[in-house]
Image: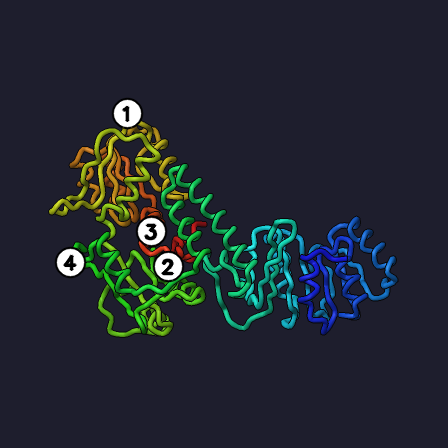
Amino acid sequence: MLDIRLQTCFDLVGGEGIVCDVGTDHALLAAELIRSGKCGRVIASDIKEGPLDSARRTVEKYGIADKVELVLSDGLANVPLDGVSDVVIAGMGGETIAEIIGNSTADKPDNIKFILQPMTKVEHLRKKLYEYQYEITGEYAVEDKDKIYVIITAERSADWKQLTESDALYGFFDDNDELGKKYRSHEKERLEKISASLKSAGDINGSQHYAALAQKMESGGDIVEIADIYRFLDSLYPFSLQEKWDNSGLLVENYDMKCSKVVLSLDITNKVIDEAFEKGAELIISHHPVIFEARKRITRNDPVFRLIEREIAAICMHTDLDIAAGGTNGVILEKLSENLKLAGEPEPFEELGCGRSLGWIVELPEKISAEELVVGLKEIFGCEYVRMSGEKQWKVRRIAFCSGSGGSELELALEKGCDAYITGDVKYDVWIGANNRGFTLIDCGHFHTENLVLPEIRRALEEKFPQLDVEIAESSVDPCVYV
């Protein structure tokens, strides 16, 4: 009576208590559970009356109406869960299943086992389950009419854990599950197609990322020596070129100096450390140094304490990243070139000697309004708010920029004949000076002018170490809230 998907769900039901079949449709699973004697009572729910009418006809046909309770419910909202041991949600999209579970997380007993069969977005469901503090206890692949379906069992967990993007795609199949291997092979092909499409669209960072994800679908992740990662980063963004006052490099070691997962962040905050720990990362790579000024005391809330406590290493690349070709200012130059038509070659802004420069000067083919420039910058930096001196209609053509906190270099921008200067963290007196000079000063924020370098670092690492799981921290966010 059941197709292979529902039969597998049936097989996974424990039968210790009441079974709830969410989105029951024709109540075929409910009928089989009762008729087989696997359980004595089933709650069959659906969001619409039509499927419940079909379910009613099924239970009446088999004479089991007294053992199957039909409930009109949006997900689990109206379902009484006392005595329920198993909840089956099959034949829906992964996002819908995740929403059903998430909307009722606070109201469910802890001893319920979920049996889930998503039709789409399996990776989204896996990730959300762990966010809701569930653990995937089993994962099974079944094939029906040349299509492979995934069935997941999940139960409440006392441990906080998060999945990386790679974890969520890879899944939890048994090593000997041949259909699981076939499913991952299909996922590899899908990710490779996405990679090729992004490459055609000119998104090199995104293309490399999906190519690395595809490779991990085939053979999983691998362990890399942190010393090898350090040497590779040093070859791209030489630590020896950092400013004398800076503190870039390997600032915190972990126990065995190896890692399989890396989290990238602009800053190493306590939230970033928590995320790295919950995702199983052994290394955080950041732009801003987690140790900068001398410390006489390290408290429990100090990120350095938490790194050591959780055995997470930290590599920080600050001013060496700012001046490198593929660093913060290099990425801004690339983004400006992609989004604005530039004339001629870029010029160094703050020249540091030995061919090094902090920031660049670019020119447009013709003058545009300051407002038009700001609109483009919002798109480039992904910032909702921009501060600007002067008037929106002022015309600009020769533009200097410096990532991070570069307001002190306003005079240099004026000396070099620029019409506008883009940076972050501009102080009050600098705004006064810019307005007195009739100069367009644009503050796109410290965070936003630097955060866009993280995908470039990920691309470089994934190209060099494709089996390394590299994740940009979800908690790497602007520390300011705008109200």
Vertically, is 27 above or below 415? below
The earlier-in-sequence mark between 4 and 1 is 4
Single out the mark in the foreground, 2 or 1.
2
Secondary structure, mark 4, is: loop
Q: Residues within 10 Å of mark 2 (few under 14, many from 20)?
A: many
Secondary structure, mark 1, is: strand
Vertically, is 13 above or below 148? below
Give the x, y percent position of residue 137: 57, 68
Q: CA distance from mark 2 to mark 1?
A: 45 Å
Mark 4 highlights which residue? 244
Using the image, tell me which numbered label, if any, was put on residue 468. Answer: 2
Can residue 67 be seen by looking at this rendering? Answer: yes
Residue at (30, 42) in percent of width and height = 332
Give the x, y percent position of residue 7: 70, 61
The earlier-in-sequence mark between 4 and 2 is 4
Using the image, tell me which numbered label, if any, was put on residue 366. Answer: 1
Mark 3 highlights which residue? 463
Give the x, y percent position of residue 219: 43, 59
Q: Nearer the viewer, residue 298 or 354?
A: 354
Three-letter amino acid code at disc 2?
Leu
Give the x, y percent position of residue 128: 55, 59
Using the image, tell me which numbered label, if any, was put on residue 428. Answer: none
Q: CA distance from mark 4 to mark 3?
A: 31 Å
